[in-house]
Image (cartoon, rainbow, N blue to C red):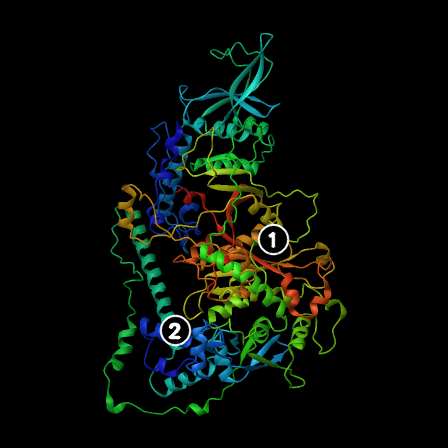
Amino acid sequence: MSLITPSQNQQGGPKKGGARRAENNRLYGHSLPITFEKSHSWTSHILGLFGVSGTRMLNPHCTGIFDPHSRSVWVIDSKDAMIMWRRGFFGKGDLSRSEPSWRTRQISAGRAAAGKHMTAEEIREKRRAERKQFKLDRAAAIAQAAAEAEAAFTEGREAKSSVVIPSGATWRPQQLVTEESPSLSPIPDEERTVEFDEDSVPDLEHLQLTLQEAFFLAWSLDCLTIIDPTTSESMSLKQIWTAFQQIHGSTYIPGVVSEIYANRFDSPFMVNYAAYHYYRSLGWIIKGGIKFCVDLLLYKRGPVFHHAEFAIVIIPVYEDPEDQETSPFDLANSQPFSWTWLSTVNRVNSQVQKTLILTYVTIPARSRVSQELLSSPACLAHYSVREVVLRRFIPARMRD
Amino acid sequence: MDDTLERPTSISKPVDLVDDGEDEQSSGEEDQGPDWTKIPSVSTARPFIPKRGEKDFEPTAAGGSGLQRHVLDRSRHAMLEALSAPRTISSKSVSYAVWYPDIARAHVTMSRGIHFTNMGHSVARTTSVEDSKKFAKRLELLPEETLYLVERGAMLCWKASDLVLTDAPGLDDIDGVPMTVQHAFAEMIGTADLTLEQYQVFAYLKRLGYVVTRTKPPNPEYPVPSLIEPPKKRRVLSCFGRVLQLVQWPLQLLLGLVSRFDWWRPIRLSCLQISDTRSLFRSLRFLPGGHDVPLHVKVSPRVTSPYEIFYNVYKPSTPFKKTAPPPPDYSVVVVNARTTPMPTLTELAALFGALPELPPPLPRKRQSFAQHKADATAPPPASTSQTTHPPSSLVQRLFPWAFPSRASPEPVRNANPFLSLKTGKKMVVIAAVDAGMTSFFRFGEGVFTEWPMA
């Protein structure tokens, strides 16, 4: 799977900003797997006369396998996985942090070992080591300056320090020069050209979609077919709907559903899906936010373009408190929060320049909405999503 | 009189000027203590709080050194010296008041200084003087205002009493006993719905120069901002738009009858209306969202919420007229952080329901520090041009999928929707006080529904 082209690393360092941005725009230009193409047939021209734009829609029709144990849907085919990732940043590689790039990384590592290049990981490690050295140098210089000042104080004279404390802007690693000098003078006849065999690297990675992502793709966009792992047949939307709701019961046994988990509006899948669909339909790219104590992160166009702007905490709100008391689910964030919790989450997120959003999802009361609606996604019309923006308010800085 | 005490804090920090949006949330230098060594020696009777500086004493692995101890001792000595200076006020600048516990107000008998331009209100009271009922207007202070003035040494307060203290020289006209600061605290906290937390927030905001008034008038004479009309949803529609809507409405109705919304196939991809990604996204927005959707949450009516707006807060720069206060810049709720959990959705909805909509945020101008400095000296520009976002019609908002892409022209967009998204349409400030430590949070009513990204 070559989502990141190996040649990028080979050319040494990342491309310059503009070129890379253009490349990203080309690769990740579509925010949904479904794309539109202008058709040039005569029918479209005639339709155009009547104000109907003559575009043709391209549906990629990908396939995934439902995996109840990991509560995810696996997209095994690398072409499908690439479509899912590049068009809307759905899912995550199971051997990668986000983009399924395991094989690419293996290949570049292999090439680097064969040639004399450094992989991105090695460059990062080197940079970290240098940074550590800088901090040690600086600490030593500060300690030396303090010792000099102390000596001057005991002698009773004015301290005049000769120690130069290194700053991040001026400090350069010394050992780097000796290391780099041989590589700076290229010796052509010594250059080894060992070809790395790309085919020796198997593709072991798959893309895993969360249940929300999978349902969004299968139900709203109709571009994902989900395969049942036991029967190996494609699941109908109704089967998917019930399976995804029931999976949040204690243990998943296909076909067997414990009664208390069935037919409930507060199934974690539904609450999360309502929030997911709401932000997706508004055009946001959504990724998980567990790193920042939140449920979701919102990206404007996608992780390759910008940092996430908003950190979303999903807060389920029962319309009827009685439903909460009888609920078998202990929904996260459904109990009243302490101010300590809020300060903690807000601290973490303002540190990383994200705005905290409390997203309230109301759960319809069983007394108000008929439970028969739960048999189809029609019940989603009775949930509502609203958000509250949270920021610290510092009176000393808000005076004008 | 002691306004000079506040001078250092009113010096605007250059760091904030450069970029106040980004690091608005970090606390920065606020948490550091004062550098007492910068205080001129005790010879001055009037102390002033100096600017902050570098930390003098850092713990080292080898333990403190002689130099560090010397610097620390000097610092500590300076602090004690500064604090030991007697705090005095001039009898010419001090105000006088009498506290009446039965009505929980202080009657200002002598008002001096600028504090009374934005504190206290006049009330007509009947006073029985020499067996004849007199109806006279007088200046009265709420408990927090009284406490604040007493605490900062701007006012002396007596407690109304039948005891006649004739032996006090020059105070023949005051009936009562003098109150200490401690006495005033013990006496006034808890009266007129004032909790200690609320007083702490009041005093903190006042010291920063804000004007703080009560939102709910404690008595009918208390001046409150004239009621702001709840903003009506005005539909700005051109003539063409009206005609279009007239035609569209029955058409959509017909369409709706013919093809009911199929919940198993929410998007008919073959539909002619979906011709590009933007219209596809628009047709995906069929689930209810946003604050206009009715809230069905059941609340038991007996429980009263601690989340009520308590203070109206005005920036120091806002022109404030005591008798006719303008609409507040901020609305502040005060809660005890230890005993009160965060507001629930219903409590927030009630708060937002009582608040007016904010004007769209002004785009922040990116400029250099030097430029900013030049601007600060020059008069501010008369008006800033800005684009407004015309609200889409209710029908369009409710049934966005039902409208073809051509019919709803894209609204004129602000260059940066993030400013609106981060501010929200309505804003309430909640001060959570934890044993004297106050955290202020602003809760904004989110507008994600109105600013789609695609």
Q: Nearer the viewer, mark 2 or mark 1?
A: 2
Q: Position of residue A273 (x, y in %)?
A: 60, 67
Vertical relation: A227 (above or below) A28: below
Which label was assigned to residue A337? Answer: 1
Vertical relation: B87 (above or below) B391: above
Q: Position of residue B332 (x, y in %)?
A: 52, 41
Q: Type of residue at label 1?
A: Phe
Vertical relation: A250 (above or below) B328: below
Q: Is residue B356 visible?
A: yes
In the image, are marks 2 and 1 on the same chain? yes
Left or right of B97? Residue A165 is left
Of residues B304 and B222, the one drawn nearer to the viewer in this rendering: B222
Disc 1 residue crowd, few under 14, some 14–19, many 20+, Cα 10 Å:
some
Of residues B173 and A264, the one drawn nearer to the viewer in this rendering: A264
Left or right of B371? Residue A132 is right
Q: Are marks 2 and 1 in contact (CB under 8 Å)?
A: no
Residue drawn at 48 percent across, 42 percent down? B330
Disc 2 residue crowd, few under 14, some 14–19, many 20+, Cα 10 Å:
some
Disc 1 sits on a residue from what chain? A
Q: Position of residue A223 (x, y in %)?
A: 55, 78
**Badge 2 element:** helix
Q: Residue furthest top?
A: B130
Of residues B192 and A320, the one drawn nearer to the viewer in this rendering: A320
Q: Is residue B32 visible?
A: no
Q: Type of residue at label 2?
A: Asn
Of residues B46 and B228, the one drawn nearer to the viewer in this rendering: B228
> How many marks can you see?
2
Q: State which tag comes first along the sequence, 2 or 1.
A: 2
**Badge 1 element:** loop
Q: Quadrant of residue A7?
A: bottom left
Kindly identify which residue carries mark 2. Answer: A25
